[in-house]
Amino acid sequence: MHNYDIRNVSLGQIKYYIEVVECNSFTKAAERLHISQSTISKNIASLENMLGLMLLIREKKNIRVTPAGKSIYDKWKQLTQQIDLDIQEAFQIQLCNIRSLSVGALDSFNPDLFIIPAIKNFKLLHETVGIRVENNGAQEIRRMLVENEVDIIITVLYDMEESNTDQLNYVILGDSPHAVCMLKTHPLAKKDKIYVKDLASCDFIGISPLVTPSYINMLTNLCTPFGFTPNFSCYTSSANSLALNLVTDNEIFVCDRTFRDFGSEHLCSKTLENTKSGFVMAWRKDNTKELTKLFINETIALFSREQYNKEW
């Protein structure tokens, strides 16, 4: 058996070697690692000397990995990936130990209606728990939940209904009818009640399907039973831009009563009769954190109380 002292091999040298093999170049590897080429060359030469192995064959314009070098690259690549996973797992354990919770909230919600009350209610019961709140669009906060960047999200019902929820559980916290917003000069602004069929001749402002495809699907499903599909005059990059893009007297956008711009003095905002939307709380099925369970149960209890048991 070949003798060597493992104490002389550093993780830095292993990382340097992996980068050189993957870049097939000392120069490119040095650029990616933001170090000089001489530093990376000396470290790998030292590594080969300590191991007594020829890992690379240096040629004038490129390098070739030896059979021994290929074998050790495959093993070390797995090793460094496992180290990264171990560090992430330890970080998650630390977060649990310092009692923290992360919540994602839809950025187009009126926060005063339920997000702030839910956070305040939980903090009142658990003063020592740290809570981090992230605001973003429906698709982004759902991605954050699936990828374990947040523990819980509070979002709109249609996004969960339109999405693959195999990994997620969700509960409806409240019902809200759909609503339509328009300029005060829009012909529909004079009507006491507005129905979906009244929107057939309107121009819709919508959130881009590249950003939130579930919003476009919701509108299509809403209108199709009445014999029309939405005619879009403009797409926006977020729900928060919908109101800013109302320009003509024939344009409208659909939201619900939890939308932050609903009831704005600059708009005419009206309920869409005989429709139903809502807001939900969702979490990953594999989330076993005790704090997550506490937040879920206490938030459900909060919205089940008499003052919250209403249609928004």
Image (cartoon, grey):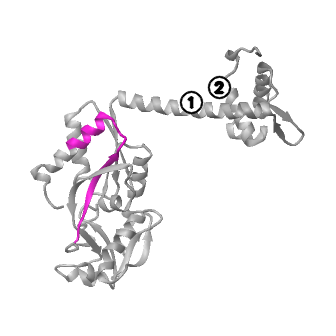
Does residue 280 appear left or right of residue 13 in this picture? left
Residue named by callout 1? 83
Q: Is residue 220 visible?
A: yes
Alpha carbon separation for disc pair 1 and 2: 10 Å
Q: Position of residue 157 (x, y in %)?
A: 29, 60
287 inside magenta stretch: yes
Which residue is pictured at 27% across the width and 30% down the height? 128
Stretch in magenta: 275-298
Q: Nearer the viewer, residue 21 or 165?
A: 165
Q: Position of residue 175 (x, y in %)?
A: 20, 61
- Please tell me which residue is depicted at 80% across the width and 24% down the height of the picture: 53
Question: Which residue type carries mark 2?
Answer: Leu
Which residue occupies the extreme right position in the image? Answer: 60
Q: Is residue 13 left or right of residue 201?
A: right
The disc placed on residue 11 is: 2
* First of labels 1, 2 by sequence position: 2
